[in-house]
Image (cartoon, grey):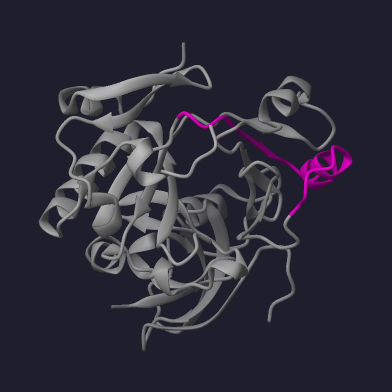
Amino acid sequence: MKILTCPVNGPRPVSEFVYGGEVRPMPDPANTSDFDWADYVFNRSGIPGVKVEWWYHLASGTWFLAERDTVADRVLRTWLPGEEHP
Amino acid sequence: MRASPLRHVLAPLHPRLEVLHGMPVALHLRDEQPGWAGVLGVCDLSFLPRMGLKGPGAAAWLAERDIPVPAVPNRWEPLPGGGLVARLARSEFLVEDGFPGGPVTGLAAQLQVGPGVYPVPRQDCALALTGSALTELLVQTCNVDFVAQDAAARVVTLTSMVGVSVTVLRLPADGRHVVRLWCDGTMGPYLWETLTGIAGELGGGPVGLDSAFPDRSA
């Protein structure tokens, strides 16, 4: 069983969570080119490595951030948005 | 008249009903056995008045009304009369009366959308699970052993049980194992059917309020 640690509720099986996608900076839609905007909307990076991702704990409605090594599928740390990166 | 989310699944069990807090409550079920509550009883407590509120001002709103506020998320505090206040997140609370009553009706009348305070409608299916076989039920249905928790620590757990999001806490009950559980009312019949089915396999079953809480004071 894979375990993910919610920063509020503690370690739980991954079945209690939903993946929310990689954290990506959104370009300013008023000032960016159509090419860059389309790239942001439609394209995702599949390059393996250490990524910061959104995750959601279904039972408590908690969104949080997780730093995950997608090569080893190992979560390095989790924290709440607005809190300092631990 | 209020109605339990479980009224349709309770009706075939031929409950002896009494209106408590404005809702018909199953005090006894026709076919329940005397020992079920001690082995593994599942009891509907949806009739207890409750309210929810959230927002950055919610803790202060409760404190101004002399309601004890749990200091950190996922903890609860008892209220006089057997009720409780559970902190479900940094700024969300569940308040529930005990059997004799409590502050919920008065608080709910005061609760309006205000600066940093927002009402949260609570139409929960509320259950109590009792008995010595609780651990056997939990290992089949969820990922947390509430029986192993120290009841004195007053921990609130938000987790999934047979696929349903639930809020759970263990009550201090003089050596008995008593777990309180809340879920969305629409999921209540599914959760009830599943839990009572497993309880039946383990030597227990659905029980009325008189069996689950024989010492209740209302």
- The one of B34 and B78 positioned closer to us in this rendering: B34
Q: Position of residue B36 (x, y in %)?
A: 23, 51
Q: Position of residue B22 (x, y in %)?
A: 50, 17
For residue B145, say whether it is visible: yes
Residue span colored magenta: B47-69
**Residue B56 among magenta residues:** yes
**Whether residue A75 is situated above or below residue A35 in the rendered picture:** below
| Tally of numbered discs | 0
Residue at the far left in the pictured view: B201
Q: Position of residue B114 (x, y in %)?
A: 82, 28
**Whether residue B165 is situated above or below residue B73 in the rendered picture:** above
Quadrant of the rendered image containing residue A80: bottom right
**Residue B132 among magenta residues:** no
Residue at the far right in the pictured view: B64
Left or right of A53 on screen, residue B76: right
**Whether residue A61 is situated above or below residue B113 in the rendered picture:** below
Left or right of A23 on screen, residue B15: left
